[in-house]
Amino acid sequence: MSESRVSDRAATSTGNAQRPRGARLPLALRGLLRDLRASDVRALFLALMLAVAATTMIGFFLDRLDRGLNRQASQLLGGDLVLESSNPLDPRFAEAFRAAGLEMSPQLGMVSMASHGDSFVLSSLKAVSPGYPLAGRVELESDATGEDAQAPGTSSRAEIPPPGEAWIVPRLAMALSAEVGDTLTVGRKQLTISGLITREPDQQGGFSEFSPRLMFNMEDLDATGLIQPGSRMEYRLLAAGDPAAVQQARDAIAPLLASADNAEVRLKDVREDRPRLGRSLERADKYLSLAGLVAVLLAGVAVAMSTRRYVERHLDSAALWRCFGASQRQLSRLFAAQLGWLALLASTGGAVLGLLGQMGLVALLERFLPLELPAPGPLPLALGILTALAVLVGFAGPMLLRLRQVSALKVLRRELAPLPASAWVVVAIASLVFGALMWLYSGDLMLAAGLLVGGIIALGLLMLVGQLLLSLMLKVVARMRGQGGWNRPIRLAGGMLARRRGASLGQLVAFAVTFAAMALIALVRGDLITRWQAQIPTNAPNHFAINIQPGEQQAFGEQLTAMVDEQAGDSQSELYPMVLGRITALKGESLLGRTQQRLQAAQSDQPAAGGMQEGRSDEGDGEQQGVPQRELNLTWHRDLPDHNRLSAGEWAPISDFADADSETRSRLAATQGVPVSMEEELAERMGLVIGDSLSFTIGSETVKAQVVNLRHVDWDSFLPNFYVIFPPGALESFAHSYMTAFHLEDERKLAPLVRDYPSVSLINIDAILTRVQELIAQVSRAVELILGLVLLAGASVLYAALVASRPAREHEGALYKVFGAGQGLLARLQAAEFVLLGLLSGLLAAMLAEGAAVGLYSGWLGLPVVLHPWLWVLLPLAGGVLIGGLGFWLSREVRRQPPMAGLRALQ
């Protein structure tokens, strides 16, 4: 061939290499389609597609489930936001809700007598307006004709008791000896019973509604004549809308809530007013987000391992491009465009699979999830594609730099291949990308940064421990003697893994991260569901009895005990006294002056001196500077309640005060203050420590107290719990009543209590317990589903990693055959190699999973730290079986192919 023809071809090739960027895309696409026949590109394509499918499936399902669960949880309030006050609400609240585009439904609650014939029962009245409830529905029992007053599953947005009618709970009907169609009297108004309530969306879980429910139309309120000067009323305004509008409304009413005129107004939503549901939903969100992050990490591992082989296979073609005049920049663009097309095709296929998959999963779980999920949104689709691109850039980008560094002389001298990218460079770039994805998924920068730093440290430890394990294994297998059986294959396999430290260590860490990620998801799932299920014991109290007068205490307790003992499985707590008191001073400083200082600072936009962090009351009322701005239920008890535990201090001062004579008690109360036990979270919000003083106003008197210990209270126990416990002998002189909680399956047995103790209010919380259990069951099934998806993603990573390393193993197998190894020895050698790799990976995975679980449990999910010693046995065994079996199966062709084909595998 003449020099002129070579020059012309080179010029043509150079001209093609220098085409504009847009003209190179078809060339990159053609190269990609040609490369799809290669195992590494197929593995890379499948890894990306499965990653996008897993992340979009998780994203779609998580998004729909999260929105659906939040919608269902909001039904417990009857809306997304609820304002409550003992005085008529400021009209500006309704104006702010209306401006934000929220739907509204005002209601009014009170406690009054309802009568039927000769029966009178103290009832919790609720006057509702059209549109109630804004979330959920009121469910009624079948009427006397056998037809459902309201068919299950139908909407009741506009269905409230018509004027002149009332809906009551069955317990009230039993107490009044009334049934549907009878007439009862409320105030001066007669109402016809038209339905029996079995479920109420905004049924309160606290003690603001002690008595059985009676619901009627707001139009009948004036006719009852119940609103009189001095009447104790509760005004409520329910609002609902899309999340953006709800947040806009919250921001708009914040200044109104901070004003002195609205000091008694309380704002509630599901995450603040329902601490049990709030924690469950928060943990579910975190778990699902964690599962999504694990799927992304597994995809990154597969992409990194596949890209390494992709780069090694394209070194020769890159050298040819350099011979034809292509620059380093042009090479980078060409291969980046090729992988960009790969990401686009894989993302499209994965997104379609993810969308179809989540539709199938929703259809499969429809009978287990009795809630209507909203339609899929576009955000998970965009996040899935963005995640694929980010994973490709972060985990494959550093390795692609090797292609631009190739020399044209490599065509003639194969030893001139550029050095691989530094492992730490790859790790650093991949970590930054993964950290950004963690921030995107979690929305918490500090959490993402903490996990990223912890992950890098853990990876460094893994590399170090992996090196030590490989060295130790080399020493162990070197001491094995004999040529028969498995001794020789194990010795050869161990030596081969130890000698190829770079490749072996990379595979070891990749498999360890995969196993650790899957184990971590399984661990968290198990402990999370166990925690949720333990949140509500099977015999949790389903009734509260309050307003038990001191003269009725003994007789009521004996009658209730006899009733509860009749049926196995029932339970009863002891009777606790209750006194209403308000905290009015902390550490000798009056809270009235502090409140005025806070309001003045708010008006001038300056921080108040000495202010404390605002907190949230688990009893649901508003707080200023961490102090409950209402009366608390105080109690006294000589001993620490069984369902509480001390977190600081001693209980002895309380029992000593109780056992002291009256003169000693008076002296201690006057000098040091009455010793009290505080709930730890409330004490933290108020800035109180052991030894600090505080004052309570009870009626017209002030009681000085001193904190002597702090208690951890399990608010999920459904047992009587109190923020403050006094010793006996301190509060008996004040007006008080008693309360208790008990579990009773047959509600009809309550009739004698209702008849014999008409002033006692019996609260049935079965509906609340049922809803919490339903929600926990739904979230638990979702957690199990996400666990299955992550396990599939992990299996795909193992498959991709073993396929990507197949050429190297083909070459090694060919060398063994050339030196006389038979198929039997080669089979045992490969099996031993994969089993050893799996065992070592399992050991590393156990260490990583245990350490990560401790950090996640204590720092993120709020679960007690639990060690899992069985991991150190199960993971190595599972790794040996899984990697050994899968690797041996994928290597079956290696054992059958001719040596010449294997020798060409790396070329």
Image (cartoon, rainbow, N blue to C red):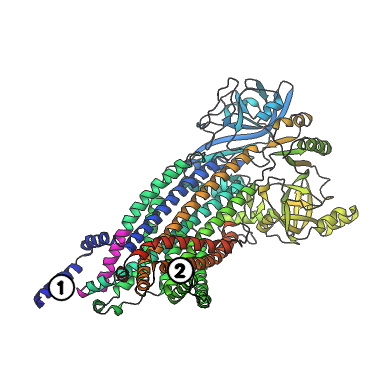
**SS assignment at label 1:** helix
Q: Residue furthest front?
A: 484
Measured as percent of width and height from the top left, residue 426 is found at: 41, 71
Tell which circle, 2 or 1, labels the residue nearer the N-terminal end.
Answer: 1
Measured as percent of width and height from the top left, residue 274 is found at: 60, 46
In which image quadrant can residue 594 be found? bottom right
Asked whether the viewer can see residue 18, the reply is no
Q: Which residues are magenta?
A: 323-342
- How many badges with numbers are in the image? 2
Name the residue nearer the viewer: 667 or 676.
Answer: 676
Q: Amino acid at mark 2?
A: Glu
The chief SS type of the magenta part is: helix
On residue 10, the disc is 1
Q: Amino acid at mark 1?
A: Ala
Q: Which residue is mark 2?
A: 833
Crowd class of label 2 (few under 14; some 14 to 19; many from 20; radius 10 Å)? many
